[in-house]
Image (cartoon, rainbow, N blue to C red):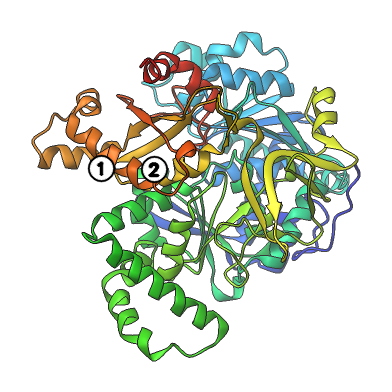
Amino acid sequence: MEVTAAPSATASQTIADLIPHAAERYPDRAAIRYKQDGVWRDATYAELDRIVNEVALGLIDLGVQPGERVCILANTRPEWSYADLAATSVGAVVVPIYQTNSPEECHWVISDSDACAIVCEDASQLAKIAEIRDSLPHLRTIVTIDVPSEEEATEEIAALQAIPLEEVRTRGRTRSLEELEARRMGVRPQDTFTFIYTSGTTGPPKGCVLSHGNYRAIVDMVEQRASLDSDAGDVVYLYLPLAHSFALLLQLVVFDLGVTLAYFGGDTRQIVGELAEVKPTYLPSVPRIFEKIYTLVSANYADPEELAGAVHVGMRVRECQLAGQPIPEELQAPFEEAEERLFKNVRAAFGGRLREAVSGAAPIAKEILEFFYACGVPVMEGYGMTETATAATACSPENHRFGSVGKPFPGVEVKIADDGELLIKGPNIFQGYHNRAEETFGAIEDGWLHTGDLGRVDEDGFVYIVGRKKDIIITAGGKNLTPANIENDLKQCRWISQAVMHGDQRPYPVALVTLDEEEIAGYAAEHGLPADMPSLAREPAVRALVQEALDRANAKYAQVEQVKKFAILDHDLSQETGELTPTLKVKRGVVNDKYADVLDALYAD
């Protein structure tokens, strides 16, 4: 599929020439913001361009050729972007690897992509490569961002002979910029920009081949709907892994528009504090951060009806403000009361300047979206896949329906197949799976991508995701159930971290539940209960809390859809144990297999 790039904010034609165009248009604006020694520092677009050029020329000096693959194994930080943009500039193909991946998972991506080079963050990532180095014959070059200390430099790590990123930059300064310009000019929209390996909820990750034209097209589409404004001093705070397509797309949009990208400091426990410091105007996130804040706030309201009333009032007032209509007199006093007690505090938690947040990568409950909208923090939902170059549809504060993932971006077509599957067509559709032509044919037919998601489109063009084809549960009685609905309802309980519904070919649905360790620890201390999770999972009082949440959730559904029994696991699900993807989606098949005995016991009676 050949894709022609459309005109862009910077007039770049590919991702390879985006940064020099941005530097020419916004030379003195802050491109990136990062925390160093406890202080936030900025680098301008002119400085970003210089650093990227140095790294790119250094990669040329190391022998990286157009079309060769360069992996990046690091957390979200400025150096990730330097390496990414530099490799792209020389015509190489960037292959991200999640910093949380195990050595075996790293091996799969490096070997499947035939990578010639890898950029590692530090000693902990180098140790993974040292463990698998002997079985990677095509890997020629290893670069490290942070040089290991004497204590960290084991014999195995030293044997890698990793080149510091600063040395790569030094090498680059010895070469001519004309070499780099020739490389950039040689990149065409149809050339491969990146391989992004899917997170693998169903089997080994597949490398999605995405072209410069794919991402140039989706960047242009997003810019037509995004509310980002460089003239207004907009700042985007990024904590999501740049190895994921969601963060990658936002990075490209930010740089194309001349906005500031603020990288989190590396510790997810400090996100809330950093939001107060950075004061972003735009926040991309996965649902978990919104779910956590919502459950904390709702826990402070002894009367759930009082909270619901405040949200109702806030929703009506925000809609009036959006429409440019006066606030009805009967709403003014209750709104001011809710504003003082609740709304302003929620906005302050995000830094006080947040104009829009975007939730992606997993479903989020409608009630949570309505809550934040009432507070004056519009959290907009979108939809897409790695195979759609990240995105395909999105809501905006001016045009949204809660519960919907929005309308297709300009140039994207959607339709619903006879079996309910959502199909997508557009210039952002990927080029296929690396080394898996037979699977690509099944995914794309006549230009239409088969998403695997069940959906519907309303009369105004808003898209709704009903469920995942492979996740649909068919009970022994033949009833089709969508597990995500009741799972999201359960996760609104402050005590619950994860909920996984089960019931395929079973007489009724059951659920596995994990406890939110931070929240339940406070409850345990207040009530004199044991502090360890295994004990709390068996504690009758804790089971009563979960049962209460389940009763509330079940009340929304027909009898046949209700979860009849549950088991509380003695630990949370995690990526490290293989139960969650890096974007915190549950690997349903893994969980069902791993806890088969627990599930069987729920049906033993």
Foreground pick, 311 / 61? 311
Residue at numbered disc 1: 519
The CA span between labels 1 and 2 is 15 Å
- Give the total number of marks visible in the rendering: 2
Helix, strand or loop at label 1? It is helix
| Residue 572 image position (x, y, % from top left) | 36, 29
Q: Quadrant of residue 388?
A: top right
Q: Quadrant of residue 602?
A: top left
Using the image, determine if residue 591 lies above or below residue 187. above
> In the image, 276: left or right of 141?
left
Specify which label sits upstream in the sequence, 1 or 2.
Answer: 2
Residue at numbered disc 2: 490
> Tag 1: residue type?
Glu
Foreground pick, 557 / 89? 557
Q: Would residue 95 be seen by someone viewing this image from the given angle?
A: yes
Helix, strand or loop at label 2? It is helix
Foreground pick, 94 / 364? 364
Foreground pick, 420 / 164? 420
Quadrant for the N terminus, please: top right
> In the image, 592: left or right of 302?
right
| Residue 216 image position (x, y, % from top left) | 78, 53
The answer to whether the residue labelled 1 contacts the one labelled 2, judged by CB atoms less than 8 Å apart, is: no
| Residue 151 image position (x, y, % from top left) | 36, 21
Query: At x 26% / y 72%, what residue is drawn?
Result: 341
Residue count near mark 2 (Cα–Cα under 10 Å), binned few <14, some 14–19, many ≥20: many
Query: At x 57% / y 44%, what residue is drawn?
Result: 361
Residue count near mark 1 (Cα–Cα under 10 Å), binned few <14, some 14–19, many ≥20: some
What's the mark number on residue 156? none
Query: At x 88% / y 48%, what residue is drawn?
Result: 3
> Tag 2: residue type?
Leu
Q: Nearer the viewer, mark 1 or mark 2?
A: 2
Quadrant for the C terminus, please: top left
